[in-house]
Structure formats: C-alpha cells, structure tokens
Amino acid sequence: MNAPHPPYNEAHNKGQFQDLQMAKQAAQPTQEEMNRLFWHSRRGMLELDVLLVPFSKEVYPSLSEEDKTCYNDLLACEDADLFVWFMNKEEPEEKRFATMVAKIIERSRSLSPVH
C-alpha cells in the first residue's frame, strides 16, 4: 500500500522559494566586491588588463563560489607569473590556477577580433 502524501503546506513551500531566492541573491557579488575586483584586475600591464578586466566584469558574477575564490587567489599572484601563464610560456604549478587561466584564455578567444 502506498504511503499517504504529506499535507500540502503552502507556507512551507513559499519559505523554500524565498530561501532559494535569497541563496541566488547571496551568490551575486555586491557592487563593492565588483569594484574591488575591477581594481585588482587592473594590473598596469596591457596584456593582462585586456584579459582580466573584461573577465571580471562579464564572467566573474556567474562563476561558482569555488571559482570566485580561485580567481581572487589568482589575482594575488605576481604580474610576471600571470604574464607567462597567459602567454602559454609556462603553466601554473597549482592545477586550480591552470584551470582558471584556461577559462580566461578561452573566454578571450571566443570573442570576435576587434578591427
């Protein structure tokens, strides 16, 4: 015999929906976080700026929390290291950085060239 279904509880379902909405909002970076990220993505080296600044503006908000942490950690690296990684001269020792560098490069390659 089938077990009876629990009674429908509209308030409970509404609460779950609100919790889901709050979780989605919490995942979105604040304007303060985006401003900080913008300035940390500006490196003063054109080759890095053209990769990092658009990525931080256009892709970062949709990244997973794990990838956001990785991107922030990547920004703590030295410019010289970032440069050789993005120019494919060397590969980062940390696999997570190599994966993030590949995502950033792939994003830039997916764009139409500017004439």
Image: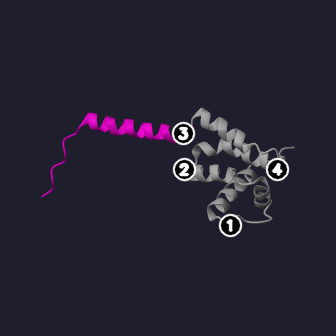
Residue furthest out toward the left = 1
The quarter of the displayed image where residue 39 is located = top right
Instruction: Check contact, mark 1 vs mark 3: CB within 8 A.
Output: no
Residue 28 marker: 3
Determine the residue positioned at 62% across, 45% down.
60
Residue receiving disc 4: 47
Task: Point out residue 64 in the picture as x, y percentages from the top left corner.
Answer: 54, 50
Residue receiving disc 1: 93
Q: Which element is circle 4 on?
A: helix
Task: Point out residue 52 in the picture as x, y percentages from the top left corner.
Answer: 73, 47
In the depicted structure, whether residue 20 falls above or below residue 110: above
Q: Main secondary structure of the magenta part?
A: helix
Q: Is residue 23 magenta?
A: yes
Q: Earlier in the sequence, mark 1 or mark 3?
A: 3
Q: Residues within 10 Å of mark 2 (few under 14, many from 20)?
A: few
- Residues in magenta? 1-29
The quarter of the displayed image where residue 62 is located = top right
Residue furthest out toward the right = 115
Residue receiving disc 2: 64
Query: Count the marks: how many?
Result: 4
C-alpha gap between disc 4 and disc 2: 26 Å
Amino acid type at circle 3 is: Gln
Amino acid type at circle 1 is: Glu
Task: Point out residue 3 in the picture as x, y percentages from the top left corner.
Answer: 15, 54
Residue in front for this viewpoint, 21 or 31: 31
